[in-house]
Amino acid sequence: MQYRNKKFSNVSDDNFNKLNSLALYKDRVAFEFKNGWTDLVYSLGKDIEDLCKLTNCELPLIQQIKEKFGTLRFYYNTLNSQYPQIVEKSIRALVFQAEIKSSNTCEICGKYGEVRVDGGIYTTVCEEHKGNSISKNEYEEIVKKHHEKRALEKGVKNAIK
């Protein structure tokens, strides 16, 4: 599928055009994240392009770039090309580094942020954009206590029977 227009993407027109200026992304993939990660995803794409140019390798096929559970997911395919192992590992390392960095980059504005939860939805946001969200650790503690309480209630019900 070709993505020649912005309707499949969540970024502004300017950021869409910036990302689409890279051959790696041009008309190939939707940008399923908000504006704050534009520079992060652009830098990742530029680094992959530079690596492939330096090693005289084809660009990998980008399958999907999105936010999931508050962090960046960057899915790509190198199966149709013969990549030297070092190039394959380097691409994997670049992607991993960007995915980790996204967990501290506000998806809305690009400032320093943290993974937070609002209504069960994970997102990485800064202090300014956190709204009513709670930290990931707070959320996981609430969920843990909820499951412990339910298990205890279930145990009491089974003991009564």
Image: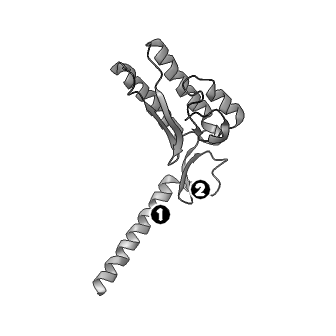
Residue at image mark 2: 133
Q: Is residue 20 above or below residue 106?
A: above
Q: Position of residue 129 (x, y in %)?
A: 66, 48
Tell me the residue at 48%/22% (across/down).
59
Decide if residue 18 is in sight here.
yes
Residue 142: which numbered mark, if any? Answer: 1
User: Which of the pair 27/41 is nearer the observer?
Assistant: 27
- Amino acid type of the residue tagged 1 in the rendering: Ile
Decide if residue 110 is in sight here.
no
Tell me the residue at 62%/41% (across/down).
8
Tell me the residue at 41%/23% (across/down).
90
> In the drawing, does residue 81 fall left or right of residue 38?
left
Location of the N terminus by quadrant is top right
Residue 159 lies in quadrant: bottom left
Mark 2: secondary structure: loop
- Amino acid type of the residue tagged 2 in the rendering: Ser
Residue 23: which numbered mark, if any? Answer: none
| Numbered circles on residues, count | 2
Tell me the residue at 45%/60% (across/down).
141
Which class describes the residues within 10 Å of circle 2: few (<14), some (14-19), or many (20+)? Answer: some
User: Which of the pair 49/80 is nearer the observer?
Assistant: 80
Mark 1: secondary structure: helix
Which class describes the residues within 10 Å of circle 1: few (<14), some (14-19), or many (20+)? Answer: few
